[in-house]
């Protein structure tokens, strides 16, 4: 019954590597998001997709590339990882323009770059 | 204009007491104000949300008070319980395509039994 799921939960990797985080929602929502929560717990939106179309793209290094193969999935690929990328990444979804704007968050992926 | 300022950073309340967390926003285009609760190791969970056409919304022990002219809103937790100990985030954004939320910095609440 998981509404928004993410894999992996933990990711430890070295600087310079490329990694991906996957997100899936089974709520039938049209809009999905990626957020970054830093070590001080500050939450900031990175990207938003509506029906596979990118609609929000915050000031994020272009090493980060989101991809939405369908409206239930939103993946985040990160190239050339840096120490500063260490954070918890949350995926979220909402119905979007069709109705409720309530955003439901996944459990997070803790990325540690060494 | 995109900031949401949240206070206090941390709060200790006795069991049964009232916890109050305040937020202020700047952007007058914001018209959706949710509160999220986050436990350690978990994702934020939507607690309660308000739109500016009402000044107060109550759900169980949780109440949002909203002051549009002052651009402030607050969360009141009545009869606070140890299980309420968590980090609380306010957020604000426009009810529009994309619904880009701006989050406050969070308040760590500890309810002492």
Image: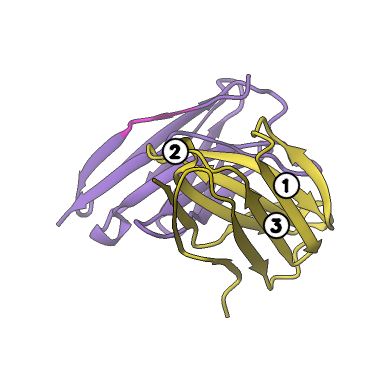
Question: In this view, which residue lies farthest toward the bottom?
Answer: A1
Tag 3 secondary structure: strand
2 and 1 marks in contact (CB < 8 Å): no
Per the image, the residue denoted by label 3 is: A94
Q: Earlier in the sequence, mark 3 or mark 2?
A: 2
Instruction: Write down the region rendered in magenta.
Output: B5-9
Tell me the chain of label 3: A
Residue A80 image point, x, y percent:
58, 42
Tag 2 secondary structure: helix
Label 2 Cα neighbours within 10 Å, binned few <14 / some 14-19 / many ≥20? some
Q: Are marks 1 and 3 on the same chain?
A: yes
Q: Output the letter for the chain in yellow.
A: A
Q: Establish if A97 lies above or below B23.
A: below
Tag 1 secondary structure: strand
Tell me the chain of label 1: A
Per the image, the residue denoted by label 1 is: A48
Q: Residue at x 75, y 59 (%)?
A: A95
Coloration of the structure image:
by chain
Is residue B6 highlighted in magenta?
Answer: yes
Q: Output the letter for the chain in purple.
A: B
Quarter of the image that includes the N terminus of chain A? bottom right
Q: Residue at x 55, y 34 (%)?
A: B66
Residue B88 image point, x, y percent:
41, 45
Label 3 Cα neighbours within 10 Å, binned few <14 / some 14-19 / many ≥20? many
Q: CA distance from mark 2 to mark 1?
A: 24 Å
Per the image, the residue denoted by label 2 is: A83
């Amino acid at each position: 019954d998981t509404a928004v799921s993410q894999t992996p939960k933990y990711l430890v990797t070295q600087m310079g590597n490329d990694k991906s985080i996957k997100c899936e929602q089974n709520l039938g929502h049209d809009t999905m998001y990626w957020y970054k929560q830093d070590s001080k717990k500050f939450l900031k939106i990175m990207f938003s997709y509506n029906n596979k179309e990118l609609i929000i793209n915050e000031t994020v290094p272009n090493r980060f590339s989101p991809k939405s193969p369908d409206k239930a999935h939103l993946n985040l690929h990160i190239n050339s990882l840096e120490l500063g990328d260490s954070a918890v990444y949350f995926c979220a979804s909402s119905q979007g323009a069709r109705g409720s704007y309530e955003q439901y968050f996944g459990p997070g992926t803790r990325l540690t770059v060494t | 204009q995109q900031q949401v300022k949240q206070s206090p950073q941390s709060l200790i309340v006795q069991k049964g007491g009232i916890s109050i967390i305040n937020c202020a926003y700047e952007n007058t285009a914001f018209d959706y104000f949710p509160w999220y609760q986050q436990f350690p190791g978990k994702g934020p969970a939507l607690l309660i949300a308000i739109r500016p056409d009402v000044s107060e919304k109550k759900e169980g022990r949780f109440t949002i008070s909203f002051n549009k002219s002052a651009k402030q809103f607050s969360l009141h937790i009545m009869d606070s319980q140890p299980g309420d100990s968590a980090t609380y985030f306010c957020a604000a954004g426009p009810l529009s395509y994309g619904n880009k939320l701006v989050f406050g910095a969070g308040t760590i609440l500890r309810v002492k039994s």
